[in-house]
Image (tube, helix red, strand yellow):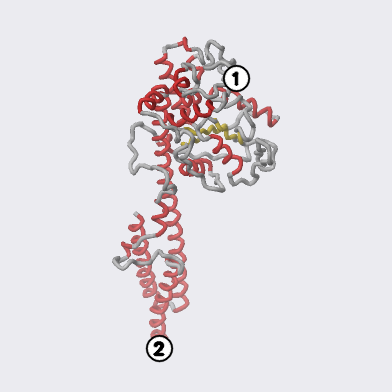
Amino acid sequence: CSGAGRGHRLIFVPIAVVIFLMIGYQYVCPADSNICRFRSDEKGLVQQRLPAFDSLYSEPEADEDFPAKITSKFNFTERDLDRHVDFNIRGDDVMVFLHIQKTGGTTFGRHLVKNIQLEQPCDCMAGQRKCTCHRPGKAESWLFSRFSTGWSCGLHADWTELTSCVPVVMNKKDKKNRSIVNFYYITMLRDPVSRYLSEWKHVQRGATWKTALHMCDGRPPTQDELPACYSGEDWTGVPLTDFMNCPSNLANNRQVRMLADLSLVGCYNMSSMSELERGSVLLASAKANLRNMAFFGLTEFQRKTQYLFERTFGLRFIRAFTQINSTRAASVGISEKVRWRIEGLNALDVELYEYAKELFLRRYQDSRQRQHQEERLRRRQERQQRQRLHRNYLVELLRLGGGGAEEEEEEEEVKVLEEVVTTEDYSSQVVRW
């Protein structure tokens, strides 16, 4: 009788093994998955390819130019590249958008108030220019921007104006005195030549921005410090040559000026230091402020801008950003000589943009790599969880099938099956790497 029972148990073990492998295969290779599908010219586990691998590493924006290898000219630290903000929208955190003219800021500003997935979305009434962006359950604003708070610190306020004005304005709006508030500054930059031409076309159509305050060290610039480029109400119809010939034109190196701390160079007093020294101080300040901002995007890389914003703040946009290259600036035909002239007038902006572009692309590359690592870790943890379930299931099957004298044989069977699972797991790691 014991011999018959032993025979039955011996038959049960291979049956249990087959059942286990079938169940394990369903865990690892679901019916609707291509994970374990082989091509006709592939053999062995090591040559399997995961469909998710290709999609994970593929560029999300095929219309944007992304170099295969980024030439490193600047020495960025890991802290410079790793940008993640634990943005507490329910607490006291405030996002401040520094809107530089003709950098795509209007489009990005609309994304902030109309295109972010929020527990309490911004309330944008039809026909109104501003939206109400309150924290969940509170009558407090989490966003300081043109389309939420308006030009509360002046028209297109720069870094110097915003850093001294925003805390005061936000405390007044929310009617509370907050000494500890996290202000997260963000901005958009654009290729200097394209931005300059776009501003010229805008001014040519009648734009002036003459109501801008340009506050610095508690006062606006005098007329001698910042003389007007034109007489009359505006500069409508100005030729490009005249636009370039005005030495006090704020379009020149606008991005550096608006990102730098102007108090370091005596604000708009050009006699406080030499032009060369002034430019060097402004550029260094603009680079430092840009580098330490919570986030900045580039007009030429809309989808990457969206990706980095989402990764930085842990927020998600509802609709994907669109890359539009058919701008007014793109339609302007200029000679190489004129281009060189514009680059010369914007030499500081050209250097800042080169710096910003490398930092932006390095951050994008670093963030993608971190995402890949997170995905690999998640898959590894899921795999380990499945293995534990497999082992527990097999042990339970063997326990139900017999015990006592056969315990050593059962343990040996478990070891063999664990080696099979480990081998499969190792092979899948080889594939992913």
Q: Does 207 appear above or below 366?
A: above
Q: Residues within 10 Å of mark 2 (few under 14, many from 20)?
A: few
Residue 391 visible in the picture: no
Q: Which residue type does callout 2 highlight? A: Ala
For the image, the number of numbered tags is 2
Q: Answer with left or right where residue 325 lies relative to residue 317.
A: left
Q: As rendered, which of 405 and 280 lies closer to the eye?
A: 280
The furthest residue to the bottom: 1
Q: Does 17 appear above or below 39?
A: below
Q: Which residue type does callout 1 highlight? A: Glu
Residue 248 visible in the picture: yes
Sequence-first disc among 1 and 2: 2
Q: As rendered, which of 386 and 319 lies closer to the eye?
A: 319
Q: Residues within 10 Å of mark 1 (few under 14, many from 20)?
A: few
Q: Residue at x 69, y 42 (%)?
A: 137
The span from disc 1 to disc 2 (Cα, nearest Å) is: 108 Å
Q: Residue at x 52, y 12 (%)?
A: 225
Q: Point out the image quarter for the N terminus.
A: bottom left
Helix, strand or loop at label 2? It is helix
Q: Point out the image quarter for the C terminus.
A: bottom left
Q: Which residue is mark 2?
A: 4
Numbered tag placed on residue 233 in the rendering: 1
Task: Find residue 196 and report its horizontal and vertical position in percent.
Answer: 46, 28
Examine the image and state in which quarter residue 39 appears: bottom left
Task: Find residue 355 and report its horizontal and vertical position in percent.
Answer: 40, 31
Q: Does 51 appear above or below 290?
A: below
Q: Answer with left or right where residue 111 lies relative to residue 60.
A: right
Task: Find residue 44 and report its horizontal and vertical position in percent.
Answer: 30, 66
Helix, strand or loop at label 1? It is loop
Q: Does 90 appear above or below 199?
A: below
